[in-house]
Structure formats: C-alpha cells, structure tokens
C-alpha cells in the first residue's frame, strides 16, 4: 500500500491541475445537487419493531383520523392576573385562538379546551391540543411560524400564550459560534508550522472535504429520510479529521524538504509514509462509525454512515488533492517562519516529559489512573433519555409552555400516553373498553384517563392517559411498563389487547433499545481495536493497554458529561441552558467516534516506538525517541480536534452541545492523559515485555507496514549505493 500511495502522491503532485479540476467538478456537482435535490430532515427518533411504533402503525391502518404519526402541538393560554379563561373575555380569547389554530397550515384537528375540560383548577390556564396531518420534519419554517403567529392577538390582549410539542421544534442549525473552533485550529496550525501557507493548506483541504461530504448528505436527503442531526455529526467529525490528516502529511512533507528532497519526491514520500498511517487511522474511524449500522437502530446507522463517508472523503482528499496543492505551493511551504517568540521553541520538551514519566512511572500511573477514576464516578448515576420541552432553552416558548403546564395541570400533562385498545376479538367491545379504562385508572401514577375515541368500524379505540409524573421520570417509565403488563390480563378476560404509544412512550422505547445496544457495540469496538492494533504493532500487550486506556477515556468522559449535562456543574461557564437525562444516543456515538480518534493517536505515537525497538534500541530509549518524534504532532492534532469539537458546545441544540462537549473532553483525556502519560509510563514499566507476541501468532498475522518503513528502505537503498560509489 505504501508504494501505491507513494506513486499516487507523485502523480497528484505532477498532474496537480487535473486533480484540482476533478475535485472542483465533484464539489460543484454535489453543491448543485444539494440545492436542487435536497429534502426535509427529520426530527423523529423511531425504531421499527418497538411496541410504540407497532401501535402507531396499527393506528395508521385502522384509525387514520387519530393522526398518530403526525406532529403535535400543545398550546397554553394563561389569563392575566385577576382574570380567568372561563369569564367572558377569557372564553372569547380561547375560542378565537382555537379558530385560528384550525386554519393554520397542515393542521388536521384542534381539541377545544372547553370540550376536553382541559382547564386548570384555578381556571386561569387552558390547554389546547393541535394535531397535524404531516410529520414534524415535513413542516416548513413557514408552517411553524404560522402556528406561532396565532398567538399574536391573544398576547396583545394581555394573555400569555406558549407552544410546546414536536411541531414547534425546527431542525438544529449551526451558526457562527461553531466557526470559533476552526479559528482556534488555525492558530494551533500557525504555531505548529510557523507559516501561514503551511497552516492554511490543512484548513483548505478540510473545508473542501466537509463541503463535499455535506453536499452529498443533502443530496441523499432528497431520496432518504435522514435525521436532522446527521449533517451536524458529519460536520464535526469531518472538520476534525480533515485538518488532522492533512496536518500529518504536511508535517512529513516539510520534513522531507528539510533533509534535501525535491518537492515531488517529498510529496511522494509523505503520501507513502504519513499517508499510510492516515489510511489506517481513517479506516478505524470509518469502521467504528459504520459499525453503528449493526445495532439495529436506523437513524443512528444513518448518522454513522454519513459521518463515515465524510471521513472517507477526508482521507481521499488528503491522499490526492493535498499533494496537488503541495505541488502549487512547492518548496515555499517550508519557507520563512513566523516567529511567535523571541527564542525558538525548545525542541526537547517532549523528550523531557518522556524521560520524567519514565523515571517516575509508578507515581505517574497511580496519579493518572486515580484522576480518571474520580472523573468517571458520576457516570454511575447516568440517566438516559431523549429531549423534550423541559430540556429546551429556558427562554424558549417550549420550555415556558412546559413550566406553565406542569404548574397548572401537573408534570404528566406534558407527556400524555396514548393507549391503543384492539377490541376486534372481544365479544362485548363496550365492556372491554370500560374495563381497560378502569384497570389503567387504578394504576399508580395515573392522574386521569380520557373517555375512549373509537374508529368507524368499532374495532380500535384510543385512550389518553395523563401520568402524574413528568415524561422523563422513572415513575412514568414504570407506568408504561405497568400498562403493557395489564394487556395480558385484559386479553384473558375480554379478548382485548392494549399497546402504548405517543411521544413519551416512543422515547422510552428508543432509550431502552439504545441502552441495550451499548454494551454489545462496546464489545464489538473493543474487539476490533484489539485485532487492528495487534496487526499494526505485532504485540499482545500493546493492544491490551490501548483498549484499556480507551475504556478509561470513555468512562471519564461519561462522568464529565453527567456532571455537566445531568447534574448542572459548570453550566454557566459552558453556556448550557438546561439539564436533564443524557441523550440516549450519546453514549453509543461517543464510543464509536472516540474509538477511531483514540486509535489515531495510538498509531501516530507508538509506531515510532516500535520502529526504534525493532532497530535494536533499549526499551527506555525506544520509548523516549518515539515519543520525541510523535508528541508534537499528536499534541497539535489533539488541540485542533478539541477546538473544533468545543466550538459546538456553543450551539443551541442540547444534543449538539453534549456531543461537542463529550468529544472535546474525550479527546482531551485520551490524548493527554492516556496517550501522552499512561502510554509512556506503561511502555517504560513493561520494557521488552510490551512487544511480546507468541511465535505461532507472529507467523499467521499479516505484516502491516503502517509507517511505510519498507518503502523508505526501498527508496533509500539506491541513494546509499550512489553515496558508496561516489566515496570510492
């Protein structure tokens, strides 16, 4: 592979105009496709096969008037102080609002608060339910604005009107704040290279790669139903790895120029050596992300595949477009440096740290492990869930609606359960419905059960159950399980069957499915890490150490996420508007992405240690030499990734905030605690034992030359013969 990449790098360098033109054409074509073919992104989080989804499918078939799959909105009307919604002025305002809601675009039905008796005990608050004939992701910004505009007249009359439900939620968007991460990455690159030209090239190629990947995702959205967070994850990962992969190759290119290679040869060698490591590192990220498809959760698999494709594009650009751009830059990329200090940066900082860790390996190990354990402790109380109006920004209309409804009707009014009763096999359907409602009413944590709504054929009915507790509470989760348990007894006694759906029940089902998938996916990733690293390092101990370090990084990151987003620590400093259960999809996403990034650093740092060991260096010197050569680039790469991910903590969506924080913190722990501290300490402690591999396993394992060592040896042999001949 290294030889092929060497030739590809030289070809791209020579035919730079052609390569640049091809990538420009691809970017333009996908950009035009994104403008003309892109579709709506979905906010829905559903998993086929869950009971809540089966109930929705049943209602769609037998009770389409219920609009079970459509978007919903809860409209809160609060009368001014000293008045009620039941006096003449209040009643007129509510009726006028209901009339306007019925005429809003795509609205299928509106439940009048007076007919449904959804008036608070103090008669100051009314709750209207709005059902749409379209799914939430099918609503346009104009549809949502039309819904919000229905409140204008009532608010002008002094009433407080707020909106909740998935009909109000738009797709999450990125803004200028995320660009701060790219700006910090640019500063890190300038410091690393000391050259604006050298710093600008990784940024340019990364942006082209992300633009290509994002355009492809939006083209795909015209043919597939994609989750609204899909492009955000691809943007996050694509930016980070795109900059990092270009950083590794540009660093090697400048090194080759510095030892006297001509630019074309330097580009070829950089692609064959650093490019080989980039291919392996990219494959680990791609496999980890694409592995999300095997856990049986479609929307998560789509997010993983989209991000994996963006990473693949970043690798292709690093191997083809980057050498072409280096061809345009030539030797100027190694030209004058920007002096950021009066004295040059001391080149032995990495070596000094490695020798310090080697001398004090036991205390360093104990301190690092203890610190990670302390940070990981909050993970023991992690609660998983999906976002609802309670986790919206405090100033948003959704959060205000949630608070007023909780105060006036109880927290459960924000998460009603829809109970589908199939009475097609009942001999006395009316009695079956009566018993179903009575049995549910007797369950703990039930505030109210509405009268059943029956379809035209009379074989399916719909009950609305209002819990006493909020939609994210453990009590509501227990209530859903209890209602489902009642189905068996009801079927035995009457022939009727119960199933529970609605947004709250669907969120519970999705969270449970994601929780169940986390451990198998973690086992898959850990097993994959062990095999891949054993191929690269031809050792059993090094992969074991690397995977244990990865698990430590994951545990510490989970603890930090719980402390911030569930417990509320440092929320003001980080700009986190609200706290609550951790997003159900976050742990699996974090495991997949952090695995790929952690393996990147492991490869770039430890391969040089192995090379020194193979060449006969003593274990301590092999560790120090390898660390000295790899530490500077790994530190720069980690700082860039942390900067890019941290920029997303400033986003509006709590999911995007938590993903950005988790990835930034995870990279921080894995790069600086695990790879830069634990790795040299353990390597120093184990000595030659770190490279132990049974002979029978050594014979059957394929030889993976990640650093392109064989290529370098092959290319250097003619030069050495020429030097020998010249000396004679």
Image (cartoon, helix red, strand yellow):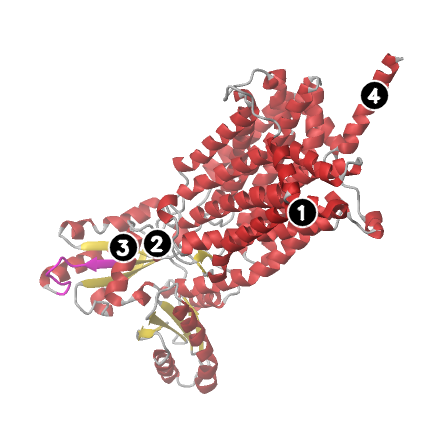
On the image, the x and y values in percent for residue 334 come to 61, 18
Residue 196 magenta-highlighted: no
Task: Identify the residue position indicated by label 2 in the image.
Answer: 167
Task: Identify the residue position indicated by label 3 in the image.
Answer: 400
Q: Secondary structure at mark 2?
A: loop
Please report whichever mark, 2 or 3, sits nearer to the chain's N-terminal start: 2
- Magenta span covers which residues? 75-86
Task: Identify the residue position indicated by label 4 in the image.
Answer: 720
Residue at 46 percent of width and 81 percent of height:
425
Is residue 706 visible in the rendered image? The answer is: no
| Crowd around label 3: few <14 · some 14–19 · many ≥20 (10 Å) | many
The answer to the question of whether label 3 and label 1 lie on touching residues, with beta carbons closer than 8 A, is no
C-alpha separation, residue under disc 4 versus residue under disc 3: 75 Å
Task: Identify the residue position indicated by label 1 in the image.
Answer: 682
- For the image, the number of numbered tags is 4
Q: In this picture, is 661 found above or below 725?
A: below
On the image, the x and y values in percent for residue 578 come to 35, 52
Q: In which image quadrant can residue 479 be found?
A: bottom left
In this orientation, which residue lies closer to the viewer: 482 or 553?
A: 553
C-alpha separation, residue under disc 4 versus residue under disc 2: 71 Å
Q: Secondary structure at mark 4?
A: helix
Residue 79 magenta-highlighted: yes
Residue at 28 percent of width and 49 percent of height:
395
Is residue 641 visible in the rendered image? The answer is: yes
| Crowd around label 2: few <14 · some 14–19 · many ≥20 (10 Å) | many
The nearer-to-camera label among 4 and 2 is 4
C-alpha separation, residue under disc 3 versus residue under disc 1: 53 Å
């Amino acid at each position: 592979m290294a030889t092929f990449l060497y030739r590809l790098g030289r070809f791209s360098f020579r035919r730079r105009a052609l390569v640049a033109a091809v990538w420009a054409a691809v970017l333009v074509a996908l950009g035009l496709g994104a403008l003309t073919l892109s579709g709506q992104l979905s906010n829905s989080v559903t998993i086929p096969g869950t009971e809540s989804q089966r109930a929705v499918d049943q209602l769609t078939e037998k009770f389409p008037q219920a609009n079970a799959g459509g978007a919903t909105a809860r409209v809160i009307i609060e009368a001014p102080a000293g008045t009620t919604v039941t006096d003449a002025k209040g009643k007129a305002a509510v009726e006028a609002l209901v009339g306007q809601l019925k005429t809003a675009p795509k609205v299928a039905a509106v439940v009048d608060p007076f007919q449904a008796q959804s008036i608070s005990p103090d008669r100051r608050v009314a709750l209207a339910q709005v059902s749409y004939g379209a799914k939430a992701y099918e609503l346009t910004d104009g549809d949502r604005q039309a819904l919000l505009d229905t409140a204008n007249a009532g608010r002008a009359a002094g009433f407080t009107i707020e909106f909740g439900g998935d009909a109000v939620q738009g797709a999450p968007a990125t803004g200028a704040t995320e660009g701060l991460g790219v700006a910090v990455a640019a500063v890190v690159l300038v410091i690393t290279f000391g050259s604006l030209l050298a710093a600008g090239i990784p940024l340019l190629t990364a942006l082209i790669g992300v633009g290509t990947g994002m355009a492809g995702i939006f083209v795909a959205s015209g043919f597939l139903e994609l989750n609204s967070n899909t492009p955000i994850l691809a943007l996050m990962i694509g930016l980070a790895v795109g900059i990092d992969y270009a950083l590794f190759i540009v660093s090697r290119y400048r090194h080759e120029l510095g030892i006297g290679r001509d630019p074309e040869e330097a580009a070829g060698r950089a692609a064959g050596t650093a490019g080989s490591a980039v291919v392996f590192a990219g494959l680990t990220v791609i496999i980890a992300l694409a592995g999300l498809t095997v856990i049986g959760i479609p929307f998560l698999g789509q997010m993983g595949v989209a991000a994996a494709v963006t990473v693949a594009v970043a690798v292709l650009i690093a191997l083809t477009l980057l050498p072409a751009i280096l061809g345009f830059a030539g030797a100027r990329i190694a030209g004058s440096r920007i002096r950021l200090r009066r004295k040059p940066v001391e080149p032995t900082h990495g070596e000094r740290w490695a020798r310090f860790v080697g001398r004090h390996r036991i205390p360093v190990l104990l301190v690092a492990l203890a610190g990670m354990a302390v940070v990981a402790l909050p993970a023991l109380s992690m609660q998983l869930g999906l976002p609802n109006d309670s986790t919206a920004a405090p100033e948003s209309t959704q959060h205000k609606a949630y608070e007023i409804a909780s105060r006036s009707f109880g927290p459960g009014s924000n998460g009603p359960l829809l109970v589908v009763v199939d009475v097609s096999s009942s001999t006395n359907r009316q009695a079956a419905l009566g018993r179903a409602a009575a049995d549910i009413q007797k369950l703990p944590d039930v505030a109210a059960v509405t009268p059943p709504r029956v379809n035209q054929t009379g074989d399916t009915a719909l009950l609305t159950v209002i819990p006493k507790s909020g939609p994210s509470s453990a009590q509501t989760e227990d209530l859903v399980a209890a209602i489902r348990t009642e189905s068996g007894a009801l079927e035995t006694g009457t022939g009727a069957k119960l199933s529970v759906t609605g947004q709250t029940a669907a969120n519970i089902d999705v969270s449970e499915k994601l929780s169940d998938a986390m451990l198998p996916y973690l086992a898959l990733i850990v097993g994959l890490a062990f095999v891949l690293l054993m191929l690269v390092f031809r050792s059993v101990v090094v992969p074991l150490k690397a995977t244990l370090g990865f698990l430590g990084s994951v545990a510490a990151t989970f603890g930090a996420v719980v402390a911030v987003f569930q417990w509320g620590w440092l929320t003001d400093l980080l700009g986190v508007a609200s706290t609550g259960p951790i997003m159900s999809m976050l742990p699996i996403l974090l495991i997949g992405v952090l695995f790929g990034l952690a393996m990147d650093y492991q490869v770039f740092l430890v391969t040089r240690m192995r090379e020194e060991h193979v060449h006969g260096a003593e274990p301590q010197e092999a560790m120090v030499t390898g660390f000295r050569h790899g530490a500077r680039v790994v530190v720069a790469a980690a700082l860039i990734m942390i900067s890019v991910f941290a920029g997303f903590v400033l986003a509006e969506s709590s999911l995007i905030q938590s993903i950005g924080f988790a990835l930034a913190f995870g990279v921080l722990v894995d790069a600086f605690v695990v790879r830069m501290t634990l790795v040299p300490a353990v390597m120093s402690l184990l000595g030659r034992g770190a490279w132990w591999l049974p002979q029978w396993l050594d014979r059957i394992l394929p030889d993976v030359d990640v650093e392109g060592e064989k290529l370098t040896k092959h290319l250097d042999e003619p030069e050495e013969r020429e030097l020998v001949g010249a000396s004679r």
